[in-house]
Image (cartoon, rainbow, N blue to C red):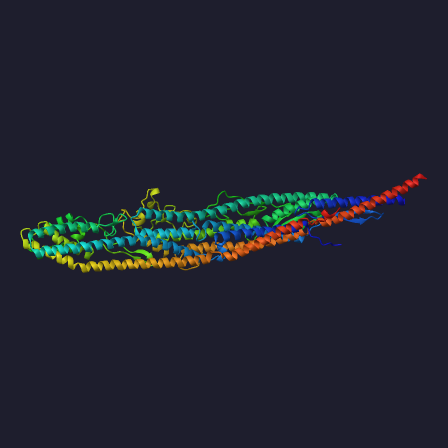
Amino acid sequence: MTMVSIGDLARTLMLQRHTGTSKQALQRLAGELASGRHADLSRQVRGDLAPLAGIEGALARIDGWRSAAGDLGLRLGAMQTALGALDGVAGATAEQLLAAAVSAQPAQVDRAARDAGEALDAMIGVLNARVGDKAVFAGVEGDNPALAGADVMLDALVPLMAGATGVDAVETALQAWFDDPAGFAAVVYQGGAAQTGVGVGPGELVAPGVIATDPALRNALAGFALAALADRGVLAGSDAGRRGLIQRSAERLMGNAGERALLAARLGSVEARLDRAQARNGTEAGALEIARSGLISADPYKTAAELELTRVQIETLYGLTARLSGLSLAGYLR
Amino acid sequence: MTLTRSLNTALSGLTATARNASAVADNIANLRTPGFGRREVVLAAQRLGGVAVSAVHRHSDPALAGARREAQAAASQGQARSGFHARLETVLGLPGAAGALADRIGRFEAALAAAAASPGSDARLSDVLGSAKGLAGQLRDASASVLAARTQADRDIDRDVAALNLALSQVEGLNAEIRRMTVQRQDPAALIDQRAQIVDGIADILPLREVARDGGAIALYSAGGGVLLDGRASVIGFEATGTVVPGMVIGGVLSGLTLNGRPVDVAGGGMLGGGRLGANFAVRDQLAPETQVQLDAVARDLIERLGAADPTLVPGAAGLFTDGGVAFDPTDEIGLAGRVSINPLADPAFGGEMWRLRAGLGAAVPGPTGDGALLVALGSAMTTGRAPVSGDFVPGLRSFAGLAGDLVSMVATARLFEEGTASFAATRSAILDQSAAEAGIDSDQEMQALLLIEQAYAANARVVQTVDEMLSRLLEI
C-alpha cells in the first residue's frame, strides 16, 4: 500500500529558505531607507549606466569650470580696479597740467611736470597689479611685473629727444617710440603674449585679452611720459617749449579718456559673459542633480511600506516555526 | 508437532518485529540526514508457517536524484559566473561612488579645467597630476582584479579536479564493497547512502548521470557524454599554472582537461563542460580575457587621445599616459590596462617636472607660467568624440567618459544577466531539494509504525506465553 508522507526535513527546509529570503529583503530595504538610494543601482537602471555616468561627468566638469571662472573673475576685477585708478589719476593730472600751462609760470610748469613724473611712477605701479602672485596685465608671463619702472622708460626716451627742436618734434618722436615694437613693447613691457581662452562652460572659452601694450593703456602712459620729459630736462632752455609739452600732455590725457572707457567696456562685457556662464553652470548643475536623484534615489514611502510588510512576514514565519515545531506525534504518545 | 510449530512461528514473528523495530530506529536516528534512503522491511510468509524478512528495502527516487544533481550543477555554475561579474563591477565602481572609474575621470577633467585658468599655480598642477595618477591607478586595479580572477579560477579548477578524482576512486571502492555485500546477502544500505552523498558532491563540480549496473554498482557519465566511472574510475588530468598573466591562453601555457590522458573539451557543451568546473574554465579562458580586451581598449583610447593633443611630442614619443613609462606600441596591447602609468617626465617623484603638464612633455624649458593653452587642449581632448580603435564597443564617437561609462554598463548588464540565470538555477535546485526532503523520513509515520510493531510484538509474545502454558499443562500430566 502506498502511503503519502511528507518528510520532516521538508518543512524545516521550506521555513528556513523563506526566513532567509525575507531577512535578506529586510536587510536590503533597511539599507535603502537609511541611505536614500537604491541598494542595487545597476538593477534599477537595468544595466544602462551611461546616462548616470554622463550626469556625474557633467557635474565634475561644471565644478572645474566654476573654479576656472572664479580665477578669471578675480583677474578681471583687478583689471577693472586698476583701470579705475588710472582714470582718476589721469583726470586729476590733466587738470593740474592744464592749469599750469594756462598760468604760464615757469615754477608752476616745473612743479606740474614733476608731479606728472610721480603720477607716471604711480600709474606703472597700478598697472603692475598682481592677483595670486601673477601680474594681471602681463599676459602669459605673469611671474614678471608687467612694466618696468618709470626710470627705465624715461632713460630710454630722453636720449631720443636730444636733437628735438620743438614740441611737435618731441611728440612725434615719443609717439614713434611708443608705437615701435622695438620701443615701448620691447624695453618697458616685460610680460608676454595675451592669454588664450580658458574654458568656463561647454564649448565656451573666455579670455581677458588685455595686456599692458593695449593702445588705450599705452597712449595714457605716453601722455604722462610727455609731461615727465619736461621734468627730465627735455626742451630745458625753452619755457614756452616746456609749457607746450605739459599742455599737449594734458590734451592727450583728456583725449585718451574715450579709449580708456572703451577698454573698460570691453572688460565689462567679458565679465558679463563670465557671469552668464556661471549662472548657466549653476542652473545646469541644479537640473543635473535633480535628474541624478531621480535615477538613484529610492522612494522613501514605498520603501517604508515594503519594509513594514517584510517585517510582518518575518514575524509570521517566526510564529509559524514556533507553532509547527511542537507538532509531532511522538509528543502525544503516552 | 503443531504446538512446537506454533512456537517457532511465534518466534519468527518476534524476530520479524524486532527487525522491523530496528529499521524504524534506523530511520528515526537518520531523521536529519540529507540523502538518507528510508529503510523498509519487506516481509514474506514462509512456506512452513511464520514470517521471514525477505529484504530490507532502501527507498530511493533515481529520477528525482538525477534532476536534483543536474539542478545543483547548474546552480554552482551560475554562482561561479555571476560571482566574477559582481566582483568586477565592485572594482570598477558605479558612477557616483567615490573612487569609481567615472569619479576619477570626472576629477581629472575638473582638475584640467581649473588648472587652465591658473597654469602657474603649483597646487592646480599637482591636482592634475594627482587625479591623473588616480585614473591610471583605477585602470590598473581593474586589470589586476581580472587577472586575480583568472588565477583564482585556475586554482579552483585544480582543487575541484583533485576532489573529483578522489571521489571517483571512492565510488569505485564502494561499488566493489556493495557488490560483495549483495552477493553475501548482507545489507549494503549504509554504503549506498555514503555512495549517494559522494556522487552528490561530484554533481556540484560537474553535471553527471548515474546508471545502475548489476550487483548494486553504478556507472557515472558526465552530462556531455564522457565516461567518469564504468567499472574502473577515469582519471581527470589538469596542470595548474602558478600565476596567470595577460596573454596566457588555453592550449598554450594554460592547461585544459584530459580524460584518461586524452584532451577533452571543457566549453559549455563539451564532454566535461558545465557545473562549477565549466564555469571556472569559462571565467579563466573566456569571460576574463574578454574583459581584459575591453579594459585594454579603454586604456589605449586614453593614451592615444592625450598623446595626440600635445604638440611638443615627436611622433612615437610617450604622452601623459604611458605604457609602463614608455610609449605605447600597438602590437603590445594585451595587458595594457595593467601597465598604464603617468609619464615620469611630468612626475616629480620620478625626477620629472610638473611644469611639463603646462608646457608640454617635449618642452625643454618651463615656458610662460600663464600659458594654459595645452591644458585647455588636453581638457577638450578628453571630451571630443573619438571612435575606439580596439575593443568590442558599438561603433560610434564617444568622449572618454562616455567610453568608460559604456564599459561599466557592459559589466553591469553582464552581471544582471548572469545573476538572473544563477537565481533561476538556484531556485530550481532549492525546489528539487525540497521535493527530495519531502520524500525523506516522516517521524509521524515511523511513530505509527512503531505502535503497530509494539502491538505485534506483544501479540507474538502472548502467543509464546500461551503455547508455553499449554506445553507445561501437557507436561504436568
Q: What count of labels does the image hold?
A: 0
Q: From the viewer's perspective, tell me whether residue B43 is left or right of residue A203.
A: right
| Residue B147 spot, x, y in % from top left | 47, 47
| Residue A223 spot, x, y in % from top left | 14, 55
Q: Residue A53 or A268: which is nearer the viewer? A: A268
Q: Residue B213 or B11: which is nearer the viewer? A: B11
Q: In which quarter of the image is residue B12?
A: top right
Report the residue that reaches farthest toward the top: B476
| Residue B178 spot, x, y in % from top left | 70, 44
Q: In which quarter of the image is residue A273?
A: bottom left
Q: From the viewer's perspective, tell me whether residue B249 is left or right of residue A321.
A: left
Judge whether residue A254 can be spotted in this image. yes
Judge whether residue B222 can be spotted in this image. no
Q: Residue A219 or A48: which is nearer the viewer? A: A219
Report the residue that reaches farthest toward the right: B477
| Residue A232 spot, x, y in % from top left | 10, 49
